C-alpha cells in the first residue's frame, strides 16, 4: 500500500509539472520572416529617403550607434540622426543580412549585415564606403519586432587627421 501511494504521488507530481508547463509554439520561421520583412522595408525606405518609414522599425527607447558620432538615444533623436544622414548629397545605400539569429526564448534576435554606399564628397567627387552593421531586435507586446540597438561602421581605414 505504501508503495502504491508513493507511485501515485510521483505520477501526480509528473502530471502537475507537465500540466503547469506552458505550451509554446515554435514561431521561429514566422519571427524570422517578420524581421526580414521589417528590414527590407527599412532598406527600401532608406533608398527613397523616407525617414518616417526608416524609423518605424525602431523601438521608442532604441539606441543608435553611428560611426564617429555620439550615441543617439530614443526614437525622436534617431529620427533626427537619420534625417541628417539621408540628406547626405548623392547618398545611395544598400545592405543585406548575412546572419539572423533568434534567441531560444523567442523575444530577442540579432541581425548582422554587410552594407555598401556612395555619397558625394568634396568637389562633387563620389565617395564609396562598405562595412558592417549589427542590430538587436526585440519582440514587442503586439508581436512585431523592433530594433532596440543598431550600430554600423566602415571596413575602410580611418582617414588621416587634417592638422
Image (cartoon, grey):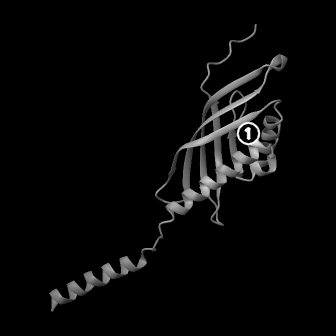
How many discs appear?
1
Figure check: 67 above or below 40: above
Rendered-image quadrant of the N terminus: bottom left
Closer to the camera in the image, 33 or 68: 33
User: Does 101 sit left or right of 53 as displayed?
Assistant: left
Closer to the camera in the image, 99 or 149: 99
| Residue drawn at point x = 47 percent, y = 70 percent | 24
| Residue drawn at point x = 69 percent, y = 31 percent | 117
User: Does 59 sit left or right of 17 as displayed?
Assistant: right
| Residue drawn at point x = 78 percent, y = 40 percent | 82
Label 1: how many Cα within 10 Å (few below 14, some 14–19, many 20+): some
The part of the image, by quadrant, that contains residue 119 is top right
Residue designated by label 1: 72
User: Does 115 sit left or right of 163 as displayed?
Assistant: left
Rendered-image quadrant of the C terminus: top right
The part of the image, by quadrant, that contains residue 67 is top right
User: Does 48 sit left or right of 33 as displayed?
Assistant: right
Element under disc 1: strand
Amino acid at each position: 500500500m505504501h508503495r502504491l501511494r508513493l507511485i501515485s504521488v510521483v505520477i501526480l507530481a509528473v502530471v502537475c509539472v507537465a500540466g503547469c508547463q506552458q505550451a509554446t509554439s515554435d514561431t521561429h520561421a514566422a519571427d524570422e520572416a517578420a524581421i526580414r520583412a521589417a528590414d527590407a522595408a527599412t532598406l527600401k525606405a532608406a533608398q527613397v529617403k523616407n525617414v518616417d518609414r526608416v524609423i518605424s522599425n525602431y523601438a521608442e527607447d532604441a539606441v543608435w550607434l553611428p560611426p564617429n558620432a555620439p550615441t543617439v538615444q530614443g526614437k525622436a533623436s534617431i529620427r533626427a540622426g537619420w534625417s541628417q544622414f539621408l540628406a547626405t548629397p548623392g547618398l545611395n545605400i544598400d545592405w543585406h543580412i548575412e546572419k539572423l539569429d533568434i534567441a531560444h526564448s523567442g523575444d530577442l534576435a540579432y541581425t548582422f549585415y554587410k552594407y555598401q554606399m556612395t555619397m558625394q564628397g568634396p568637389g562633387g567627387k563620389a565617395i564609396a564606403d562598405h562595412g558592417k552593421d549589427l542590430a538587436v531586435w526585440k519582440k514587442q507586446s503586439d508581436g512585431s519586432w523592433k530594433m532596440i540597438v543598431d550600430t554600423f561602421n566602415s571596413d575602410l581605414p580611418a582617414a588621416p587627421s587634417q592638422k
